[in-house]
Image (cartoon, rainbow, N blue to C red):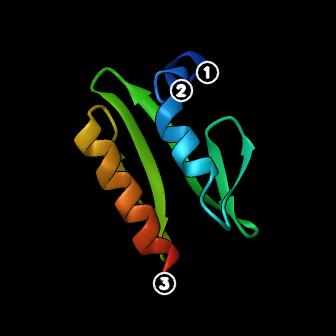
Amino acid sequence: MKHASAAALHGLSELLEQIRVKEGIREKSLGVFYRGPKAFLHFHEDPAGLFADLRVGAEFERFPVNTKKERKALLTAIDRTRAI
């Protein structure tokens, strides 16, 4: 599964804006977010759609982000993970 292209990320612009305003997370490059010195969140695309890999503890969990409901679930997971 390849990293999401700029064109694919353009379709997630509203979601990316919601992530960018979260405290403690910085976007190192388009669609690649860090929390402190560690990679925290990035996006992939494949024929099944767009997916986000979110660091939860030591591992990454994959979240689909193709619908508003899926995007909301990712935002909730980000907030939950940041509270750890």
Amino acid type indicated by mark 2: Leu
Could you tell me which residue is drawn at 52 percent across and 46 percent down?
A: 18
Q: Label 3: which residue?
A: 84
- Which residue is found at the position 28% from the left and 37% from the top? 68
Image position, residue 53 (x, y; %) = 45, 51
> Disc 3 to disc 2, how far (Cα)?
27 Å
Q: Inspect the image, locate mark 1, and give the three-letter code of the amino acid beneath it.
A: Ala
The amino acid type, in three-letter code, at marker 3 is Ile
Please tell me which residue is depicted at 30% across the width and 31% down the height of the picture.
66
Q: Is residue 33 left or right of residue 2?
A: right
Left or right of residue 17: residue 25: right
Residue located beneath label 2 in the image: 9
Q: CA distance from mark 2 to mark 1?
A: 5 Å
Q: Residues within 10 Å of mark 2 (few under 14, many from 20)?
A: some
Occupied quadrant, residue 5: top right
Q: Residue at label 1?
A: 6
Quarter of the image for residue 67 reads top left
